[in-house]
Image (cartoon, helix red, strand yellow):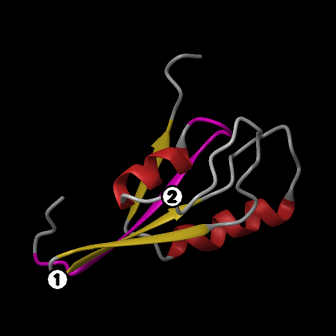
């Protein structure tokens, strides 16, 4: 992944529970930084994973699954505060469902 002129990039990864957000981040970073489980809501708070390539740094933020049925205000507030300082949002979907 090449970055032009920009030396750092912050990517917020979001989506519904159990769509593969943590798996995707682990893949890009090249190591297991986020727990992967079949259980929904395994990620309960944002997890930061950082990878570098030359002088460039990419920070991935793994977020708890977005679930409109749950009224978990702390998860929603964590999400809102993360969006403000993000360069890129990646919304992950499970195309098998």
Residue 37, compared with residue 82, is above or below; it is: above
For the C terminus, which image quadrant?
A: top right
Secondary element under disc 1, as helix, strand or loop, is loop
Residue 43 in the figure: left or right of residue 29: right
For the N terminus, which image quadrant?
A: bottom left
67, 22: nearer the viewer: 22
Residue, far right: 71
Query: Badge 1: how crowded within 10 Å, few (<14), some, or many (20+)?
Result: few
Q: Which residues are magenta?
A: 5-19
Residue 32 in the figure: left or right of residue 53: right
27, 76: nearer the viewer: 27
Residue pictured at 70% horizontal, 69% vertical: 78
Secondary element under disc 2, as helix, strand or loop, is loop
The quarter of the picture where residue 16 lies is top right
Give the x, y percent position of residue 38: 71, 35
Q: Which residue is mark 1?
A: 55
Residue pictured at 39% horizontal, 50% vertical: 27
**Magenta span contains residue 52:** no
Give the x, y percent position of residue 86: 44, 70
Mark identifier at residue 64 = none
Residue pictured at 49% horizontal, 40% vertical: 92
Q: Which residue is mark 2?
A: 32
Give the x, y percent position of residue 85: 48, 77
Q: CA distance from mark 2 to mark 1?
A: 23 Å
Residue 75 in the figure: left or right of residue 28: right
Q: Earlier in the sequence, mark 2 or mark 1?
A: 2
Residue pictured at 17% horizontal, 83% vertical: 55
């Amino acid at each position: 992944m090449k970055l032009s002129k920009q030396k750092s990039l912050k990517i917020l990864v979001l989506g519904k529970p159990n769509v593969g957000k943590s798996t995707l981040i682990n893949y890009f970073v090249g190591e297991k930084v986020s727990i992967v489980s079949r259980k929904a809501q395994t990620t309960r708070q944002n997890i930061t994973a950082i990878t570098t390539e030359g002088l460039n740094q990419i920070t991935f933020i793994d977020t708890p699954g977005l679930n409109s049925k749950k009224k978990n205000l702390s998860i929603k507030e964590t999400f809102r505060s993360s969006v403000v300082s993000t360069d890129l949002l990646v919304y992950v979907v499970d195309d098998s469902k």
